[in-house]
Image (cartoon, rainbow, N blue to C red):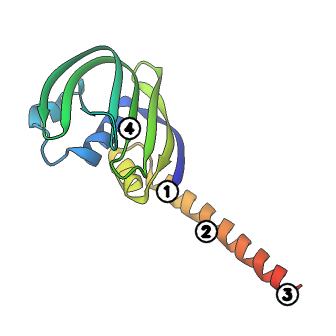
Amino acid sequence: MVHIQTAASLENFRKFIIVSTCRSFIPESYLRDYEVFPEREEGPGAIYIEAVDKVTLKKIREMTFVNAKEILGIIYSSKSGNTQLKWRQTRKKSGRVQGTASANALVNLVESGVLTQEWVDNYLKSAQSKEDNNSSSLAKEKMV
């Protein structure tokens, strides 16, 4: 699991949700409309859009598509439970993403523009150097 805390546009987080959940069956008109968001009922894989104005458009499979204006926040959790992310508005269509993400979610976060490949590469380098430090510390302890 990777802890995420980064600035992200509403559109990029919307793309992440679509790529992660309904890319294969979202109607083309909904995909092009930046005010349409997928939601999913509570439970494993819940997605909730918190908005000033929200209207239900259509339910397709387990997803309910809503037209939402003035988004305040989005809560996303994967069906597996390995990814839990929240987007909170900071200014108009800008916000912050916080939470934990699985390796699969990382790929989708990069693909959607929420994270850059550079961010992931730096994270992996940092994680590797921590692992190397821990390994060398354990080796020193065993020698003593």
Q: Is 19 drawn above or below residue 142 in the view shown?
A: above
User: Could you say whether the residue bearing mark 2 is in a helix, strand or loop?
Assistant: helix
User: Could you say whether the residue bearing mark 1 is in a helix, strand or loop?
Assistant: helix
Q: Residues within 10 Å of mark 4 (few under 14, many from 20)?
A: many
Which amino acid is tagged 3?
Answer: Met
- Of badges 1 and 4, nearer the viewer stands 4
CA gap, disc 3 to disc 2? 23 Å
Percent across and percent down for residue 60 are 12, 36
Residue at mark 1: 120
Residue at mark 4: 76
Residue at mark 2: 128
Q: Quadrant of residue 52?
A: top left
Q: Is 10 drawn above or below residue 136 in the view shown?
A: above
Sequence-first disc among 2 and 1:
1
Sequence-first disc among 1 and 3:
1
User: Could you say whether the residue bearing mark 3 is in a helix, strand or loop?
Assistant: helix
Sequence-first disc among 2 and 4:
4
Q: Nearer the viewer, residue 16 or 42?
A: 42
Which amino acid is tagged 4?
Answer: Tyr
